[in-house]
Image (spheres, grey):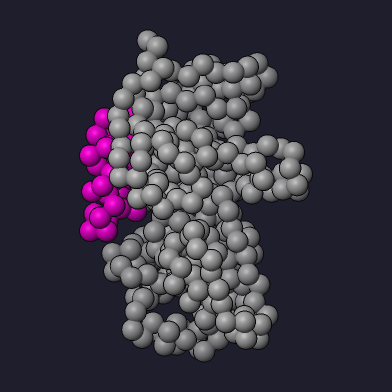
Amino acid sequence: MSQMKSVVCVAPGELRLGEVPIPTAAANEVLLRVRRIGVCGTDMHIFRGTQPFLQYPRVMGHELSGEVVTAPDGSGLAAGDQVFVMPYLSCGECVACRKGKTNCCKNIQVLGVHRDGGMAEYLAVPAQFVLKSEGISLDDAAMLEFLAIGMHAVRRGAVAAGQRVLVVGAGPIGVALALFASLKGGEVTVLDTRADRLGFCKDVLKVAHTVMAGEGDVDALRDITHGDFFDVVFDATGNIKAMERGLDFVAHGGTYVLVSIVPERISFADPEFHKRETTLMGSRNATVDDFREVLAAMKAGLVPTLAMNTHRTTLDEFIDTLPTWMDPASGVIKAIVEV
């Protein structure tokens, strides 16, 4: 067999399922049989045409698990190994990589964004970005990436036991933030516009508080914190107005972590920023240490992956299914494509 199925986003709003040649792995690459693909907000931004780092056509898919077909000597991998992919292909040489911050490599190539990803039956990936996932299921391995983004941001924000933490936006990344901030001992409040997502955070993640965004939300957040507001605030909305507004919820001496990305400039009132002596951070992608910490948490039974995986489909049906998942009424937390 020399051909494989692959889904290409040809242009915003246009997906195409077709057959392309199976990739040939280079000397330093693993040939991976893709088995599961997580679908996330980035994929939906690509479909909408609002992903700022992307050129079309593009094969989406960066939340990947599968099985090794071939692997280079010395990689520690062998045919049949169950693995996950760390999709941020870093150069290892730039100023960020030299500091160990491979997640924000100057020359980064993110699978499914800067280069074609894994919405296909096979994928060739440099061996250093393919890691074993023994002890967890293929489904769980495909969820490592979005959870690692949350873990990285929580580590960036240095969440500590007893701190008041606010997560704004309860999509998949917000769920990951709330989970790991809670596991670090934070008293977590989640703010969102959707009752179903707030209910998930309360019932499944057991966060301390949930608040519906809208009229009266500032008063509710003030009351929860006895007027102090929050030691650490995370934005996971992808909404510029929410990102700008979030500064108002940061306590004096607190930290604001922007996990979302938008194409526009964002701005704050400098007096508010200054008088709080706010620490402002961006949080991008994740490092191998974040993936390993999430993997350990999964093995310890601390991550409710079964509850998070709310929707699934097959590669053949993905084109017809994705638009339905983008309707908020569908209630997607994490969707997985089986290959």
- Residue at 40% x, 11% y is 2
The range drawn in magenta is 310-339
Viewer-proximal residue, 300 or 229?
Answer: 229
- Residue at 66% x, 82% y is 274
Q: Is residue 164 magenta?
A: no
Viewer-proximal residue, 292 or 110?
Answer: 110
Residue 48 spot, x, y in % from top left? 35, 50
Residue 49 spot, x, y in % from top left? 38, 49
Say if residue 7 shows up in the picture: yes
Asked which quadrant contains residue 314, the reply is: top left
Please say if 211 is above or below 329: below
Residue 74 spot, x, y in % from top left? 68, 19
Q: The C terminus lies in which quarter of the figure?
A: top left
- Residue at 34% x, 31% y is 7
Q: The N terminus lies in which quarter of the figure?
A: top left
Q: Is residue 336 magenta?
A: yes
Residue 327 spot, x, y in % from top left? 25, 55
Please say if 324 is above or below 85: below
Taking the view exactly as shown, the residue that stands out farthest to the top is 1
